[in-house]
Image (tube, grey):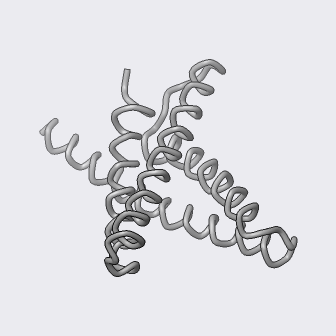
């Protein structure tokens, strides 16, 4: 019975991860639009601000509702958020490299590769969050 409950918890985590992933994507797009179209910032500035905002939103929602973080003190929380941002930055670089290599160099369809790399990045982010950032002590 304990194994069934544990398996149910994993699926629940995945469902919440997907729900908050969609919300994070919306935050990213909305913040980008506001910065670029309402504030008149450049594409690069808008993208950076949108990414930071989206990652912060993802951290807050993931720590509470997906991975149920128990970090209470300031040191643990700072370590957790730094790990989260660094892992997201690393997967962002993987995304960029995959797109550059497979689309720009090898000429594979960009939409296909974007979909494929997003699946890869989502899986890597989930694994990093589960095993590194919000690991159970």
Q: Is residue 37 above or below residue 59?
A: below
Q: Is residue 68 left or right of residue 4?
A: right
Q: Quadrant of the C terminus?
A: top left
Residue at the extreme right: 39
Which residue in the rendered view is the most extreme toward the front?
105
In the rendering, at what x and y percent does residue 116 appear?
Answer: 32, 69
The image position of residue 127, as x and y in percent, is: 33, 43
Residue at the location (75% across, 61% down)? 45
Relative height, residue 26 to residue 50 (above, below): below
* In the rendered image, the vertical position of residue 69 relative to residue 29, given as above or below: above
Of the pair 5 and 106, the residue shown nearer to us? 106
Q: Position of residue 74 (x, y in %)?
A: 66, 21
Residue at image point 37% right, 63% down: 101
Nearer to me, 17 or 116: 116
Q: Nearer the viewer, residue 110 or 120?
A: 110
Q: Nearer the viewer, residue 3 or 23?
A: 23
- Residue 60's place in the image compared with 121, above or below, is above
């Amino acid at each position: 019975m304990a194994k069934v409950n544990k398996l149910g918890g994993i699926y629940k985590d995945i469902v919440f991860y997907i729900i908050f992933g969609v919300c994070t994507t919306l935050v990213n797009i909305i913040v980008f639009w506001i910065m670029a179209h309402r504030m008149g910032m450049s594409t690069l500035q808008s993208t950076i601000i949108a990414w930071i905002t989206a990652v912060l939103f993802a951290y807050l929602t993931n720590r509470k509702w997906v991975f149920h973080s128990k970090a209470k003190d300031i040191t643990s929380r700072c370590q957790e958020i730094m790990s989260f941002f660094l892992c997201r930055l690393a997967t962002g670089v993987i995304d960029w490299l995959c797109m550059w290599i497979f689309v720009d160099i090898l000429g594979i369809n960009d939409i296909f590769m974007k979909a494929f790399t997003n699946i890869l990045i989502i899986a890597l982010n989930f694994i990093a969050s589960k095993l590194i950032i919000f690991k159970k002590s």
